[in-house]
Image (tube, grey):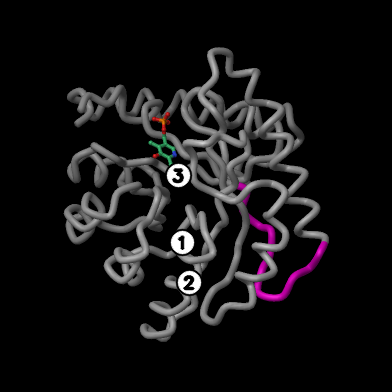
Amino acid sequence: MTEKLSAKEFDLNFDAIMQRLESVAKRSGRKTEDITLLAATKTVDVKTINYAISRGISYIGENKVQELLLKNDDVVGAHRHFIGHLQTNKVKDIIDKVELIQSVDSIKLAKEISKQAKKQDIVMDILLEVNIGGEESKWGFTPENLLSAVKEIAAFDNLFIKGLMAIPPICENMEQNRKYFRKMYKLFIDIGAEKIDNSSMEILSMGMSDDFDIAIEEGATLVRLGTALFGRRIY
Ligand SMILES: *Cc1c(COP(=O)(O)O)cnc(C)c1O
């Protein structure tokens, strides 16, 4: 759960974020509308999610299959993404419920998404998750393996690779993440330049509540915000 959030508090949070977004876009020479704000809605109740959507949130993301399934039918509107680690045996449960899976972190998972998308006769948009900090504990492709993974996965049926996603290491000082964001942007550009069929580097998903300004300065096209919109999570 999140601490109880009033409509007014959400409005204030949202306004403050939009102001930060506009100012960082401006100083980075980018357009605000070119940066997608996705609300990370884990632990947030359906009523609050629907309120957020009514105020202008148009992208939402869940990171757990069970929670997504629990809320999905009651949420009204918004583009829906999956943003958490996805087990292969759960792909079939969400394949027809989200329009983009941001967190494709293995060839095996991509293969399963391809199989399930084929069954549904759809093309599933995906991002590949990069373990940009080289952390043992994190899922994702290493920067070194990324290009070959993109080539391999792009050849799978019923999939389209729309870009990259990363969750950098937890740092004490947010400036420390800048180097990871910069590395991600370079990968994004370099892979885009390869012009691989069935892929286009359009979305670079990086930056969360504490560091989204820095991520945008370094080239993020989509930021995923939870706490900054909905307040602190209490489990
Ligand atoms: C929860 C979550 C976020 C948002 O985190 P905050 O720090 O609360 O903004 C972003 N991305 C993923 C994958 C998440 O699970």
Q: Position of residue 72 (x, y in %)?
A: 23, 58
Disc 3 residue type? Leu
Q: Residue at x 47, y 36 (%)?
A: 137
User: What separation in Å lies between label 3 and label 1 (alpha carbons)?
Assistant: 12 Å
Q: Are marks 2 and 1 in contact (CB under 8 Å)?
A: yes
Magenta span covers which residues?
194-204
Disc 1 residue type? Leu
Determine the secondary structure under disc 2. strand
Q: Are marks 2 and 3 in contact (CB under 8 Å)?
A: no
Disc 2 residue type? Met
* Left or right: where 120 falls relative to 156: left
Which residue matches tag 2?
124
Determine the secondary structure under disc 3. strand
The quarter of the picture where residue 44 lies is top left
Viewer-proximal residue among 107 and 227: 107
> Where is ligand 1, by quadrant?
top left
Circle 3: is it few (<14), some (14-19), or many (20+) Cα within 10 Å?
many
